[in-house]
Each structure stands twice: as C-alpha cells, then as structure tokens.
Image (cartoon, rainbow, N blue to C red):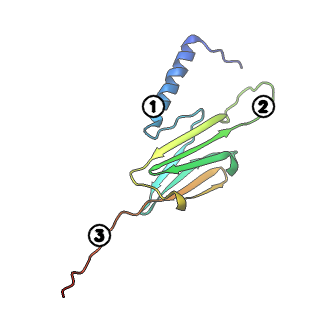
C-alpha cells in the first residue's frame, strides 16, 4: 500500500506539527509517535506510567529540571518485509514533556522498565515548614 502526499495532506501535516509544537509548551505530546501516560499525584511524589513496548532502558532518555519531566526515545523497527499489508506498530521518535505544580527532586527520582511499561517515581521538593522559636529572657 503506497501513500501519496498531496498538497492538501502536506499542508494538513505541517499544521498538525505546528499545533504539536505549540501544545508541547503546555505539557502535551509532540512527536511522531504518541505514548500514553498515567500520572498519579501521591502525597510526597508524582508517579508516571508510560506504555513503551519493544524498547530497552538504553533507548529511553528521561530529563528532570525544576518542575518539568521530559521523556524521549525512538521506535526503530527494521523492515522485515518489502511490503506490508498492514503496519500498526509505532515507528519514529516520541517526546513527552510534563510540567507539574510542584518542584521535583531529580536526584531522588527512580525509573524502571518492565514488560514495556516505564514507571517513574519523582519525589516532590518538600515545602518549607514553619519552625517555632522560643524567646529567651535574661
């Protein structure tokens, strides 16, 4: 099955890419491939679960800066046949960037990849707590 690029399709894809770039500034996906995410807000940490089948830990890059987490990688399946009747596996780069309401402790973050599911636990920076000070008399 061959797909031809008509001027209409090119214009549509260009506009879609521009929308993705703009949406990425607000923490929405921008990539060739969309990876679904679940985000949990625990008392002291955020937990992310992403479905990333077929990749090894070395194929995934995670960056944490202040209140933003970025996950990127690439699905790179080699052609196993000259022509497919149907091809639905993801192919290409993915990039997700999420911004949180709390600052994150990047040094204490933990990530693991098991059965195609990336789990990322990122502790929140503790909020400043008031401290009582006793007044001394002389």
Is residue 95 placed above or below 85 in the rendered structure?
Answer: below
Measured from the top left, where is residue 96 in percent x and y? Answer: 53, 41
Q: What is the quadrant of the C terminus in the image?
A: bottom left
Q: Earlier in the sequence, mark 3 or mark 2?
A: 2
**Residue sticking out furthest to the top:** 7
Label 2 Cα crowd, 10 Å radius (few <14 / some 14-19 / many 20+): few
Please name the residue that numbered disc 1 is placed on.
22
How far apart marks 1 and 3 lie (CA) works out to: 40 Å
Q: What is the quadrant of the N terminus in the image?
A: top right
Please name the residue that numbered disc 2 is placed on.
79
- SS for callout 3: loop
User: Left of 136 or right of it: where is 70?
Assistant: right
Label 1 Cα crowd, 10 Å radius (few <14 / some 14-19 / many 20+): some
- SS for callout 1: helix
Please name the residue that numbered disc 3 is placed on.
130
Contact flag, marks 1 and 3 (Cβ < 8 Å): no
| Residue at horizontal 62 percent and vertical 47 percent from the top | 61
Measured from the top left, where is residue 56 in percent x and y? Answer: 70, 49
């Amino acid at each position: 099955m061959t797909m031809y690029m008509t001027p209409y399709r090119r214009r549509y894809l260009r506009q879609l890419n521009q929308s993705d770039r703009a949406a990425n500034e607000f923490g929405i996906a921008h990539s060739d491939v969309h990876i679904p995410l679940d985000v949990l807000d625990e008392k002291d940490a955020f937990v992310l679960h992403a479905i990333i089948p077929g990749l090894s830990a070395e194929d995934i890059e995670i960056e944490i800066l202040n209140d933003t987490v970025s996950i990127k990688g690439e699905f790179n399946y080699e052609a196993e046949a000259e022509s497919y009747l149907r091809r639905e596996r993801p192919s290409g780069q993915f990039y997700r960037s999420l911004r949180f309401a709390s600052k994150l402790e990047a040094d204490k973050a933990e990530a693991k990849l098991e059965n195609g599911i990336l789990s990322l636990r990122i502790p929140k920076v503790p909020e400043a707590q008031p401290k009582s000070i006793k007044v001394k008399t002389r």
